[in-house]
Image: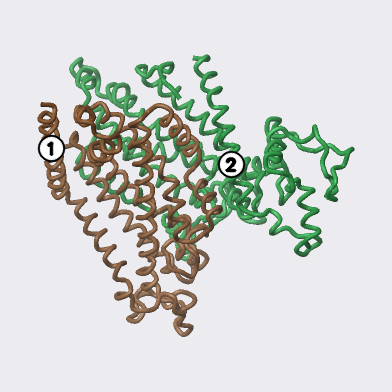
Amino acid sequence: MADKIGDRSATKTRAHADNFWVVSLRALRRDAAAMIGLAGLLLIILVTLLSPLLAPHDPLYQNYRARYEPPGGATYPFGTDDLGRDVLSRVLWGGRESLGVAALAIAIAMGGGVVVGLISGYYGGWRDVLIQRVTEVWLAFPGIIFLIVLVSILGTGLEKVMIAVGLTLIPGYGRLVRGAVLAARAQDYVLAARALGARDARIMFHHILPNILPPVIVFATLGLGSAILIVGGLSFIGLGVNPPAPEWGAMLLYARDKWRQAPWLSFYPGAAIFLTVLCVNLLGDGLRDALDPKLR
Amino acid sequence: MLKYIAGRIIQAIPLLFIISVILFAIMNSIGDPLAIQLSQGRPPTGEERLRMRRRMGLDQPIYLQYIYWMIGNDWTYIDADGDGDTDENIRGPRKGVLRADLGRSLITKQFAQVRIMERLPNTLILMIPMYILAITMALVLGAISALRQYSALDNLLTTAAFVFYSMPIFFISLGMIFIFAIGLRNWGLPHTPIAGMFEPGEPKTLTNLIRHLILPASSLAIIYAAAYMRYVRSSILEAMNADYVRTAYAKGLAKRRIFAIHILKNAALPLVTIVGLDLPFVLGGAVITESIFAWPGMGLLFIESLTRSDYPVLMGILMLIAVAVVVLQLLTDLVYSLLDPRVALMGQTG
């Protein structure tokens, strides 16, 4: 008897969930701005992934005969820097670092936030109090200052920046997940799963998580944009990727005192960051509208 | 009300204490403040380093250093000449944070509070006009955008907000410099200075200050305004469709009155929260903007102190921000309860 009831409610939930994603996807497809963002982002990812094939030159090769070549030439479409390095190749290669670091940082933040938020919201009690107090301390610092402190503990370099940015962003995701879990915990499907004897971990990850995923996905997509900006900003103040590795923020830092002679050195990496963030935000806004049943 | 405020302040004390312990431990492990110090114009020898370390009290265990930082060391004897023995007749010079002494900078030997107070006004000079500009722009443009929803003007404004919201601060700053400082000068037009608060040798007049303020303040303001405008627009739209607004129209109230009292007041709530969350960090200065424009504020001081492991100054800045976070969260809640009588202060926790 109990089995039957449980089974039925489980199928119902799943069927509903499928519908939800299908309907949301359809809504997203109708959103022209979001589709432009998605297409742009996929293009940028593709181009950066193919940078070894697409880049006309070695991003680190210094051609002293072609220093400060202005953009527009056939050999150097984006010009060269003071050491004769090809800006186009550096922008292409730089995307791998900028995008990769930002994406992995968001993955760390999301993974950490989901685990922390689930535990905090599902169990409540001392675990919740402990996690919430730590979160408060964590959030009591400006992001950039916390980051600078973390980077100076961990040291500069790609993977350090990634970890630092990820750690800094965890509390935001934790709060979001916790709020959603608190609302979900009292729902019938959770009670049903518990009545069937499901373990806590199964309820948390199998039953609650899929249901609270939409806001997390939206938050993560929009967060990717800010993560790209943060990584770029860290490099720009000299705390990010180590030179001479090409990275968009680091390229901007390098170009900083040369904008009089060579404005293109700042323009191309800056525009690359800007366009990527713009595409990510377009997609994120569209996802938010598509995944929010209230707005449909 | 007073009881509530007092309660919140008392709750904040353990939080601030924990923050200070964690930060102190971190700040003491990020680098060696002696690494860049010179003794008689050259890097110190091992013997000299040890002596300097003892004189600065850096040889003490970290919990003692924390206690000295917190309550001072004028109640105990210290090793003033750095020979390794405690001098039995010399008491420590420090009063501790609780008696408004943040300790001396390890680099400049000035009091950390002096270093910070030199820079804090500069950051406020940058951030207060910037914030006023940003919030005004966000409210006005957000309201226009919401009132003319889906018009060409609304589309233009929301697109512009979206574009600027996606723009990295360094990109916008460099762009501004390129157009308004370099471009205008090349074309022989009136132009703004590139960096700093005053040109060397210039009289420190208000006009000069404002000329230098234009670029950093407007770069920051554009980005903040773009972000806030999106909130203002959506919360005004939400309020416009609320039942109480329909009731107000039905009662025959003047449109202007409905907008000012019913819509704007309710739409201001989310903005208050967001601004309240953002404001404390204003004290930390805009690290990136200040470093682009060489604006001698808190952000730049923080970076300078960090690269030299000058922990008394770092601790001072960070604790100032932590206190500001607590105070502004309280203020946000108070403003909230003033704007929205439904929010009961006493019922809130944390």
Crowd rating for badge 2 (residues with CA inside 10 Å; few <14, some 14–19, many 20+): some
Q: Determine the residue positioned at 21% across, 38% down.
A: A292
* The chain coloured brown in the image: A
Toward the viewer: A11 or B276? A11
Residue A100 found in image quarter: bottom left
Label 1 chain ID: A
Cα distance between the residues tagged 1 and 2 = 48 Å
Please give left or right for residue A57 compared with residue B93 in the image: left
Apparent colour of chain B: green
- Residue for badge 1: A16
Q: Residue at x 35, y 57 (%)?
A: A274
Residue at 49 percent of width and 57 percent of height: B190
The amino acid type, in three-letter code, at marker 1 is His
Instruction: Let me know if marks 1 and 2 both belong to one chain.
Output: no
Provide the residue designation for mark 2: B23
Looking at the image, residue A138 lies above or below residue A255: above
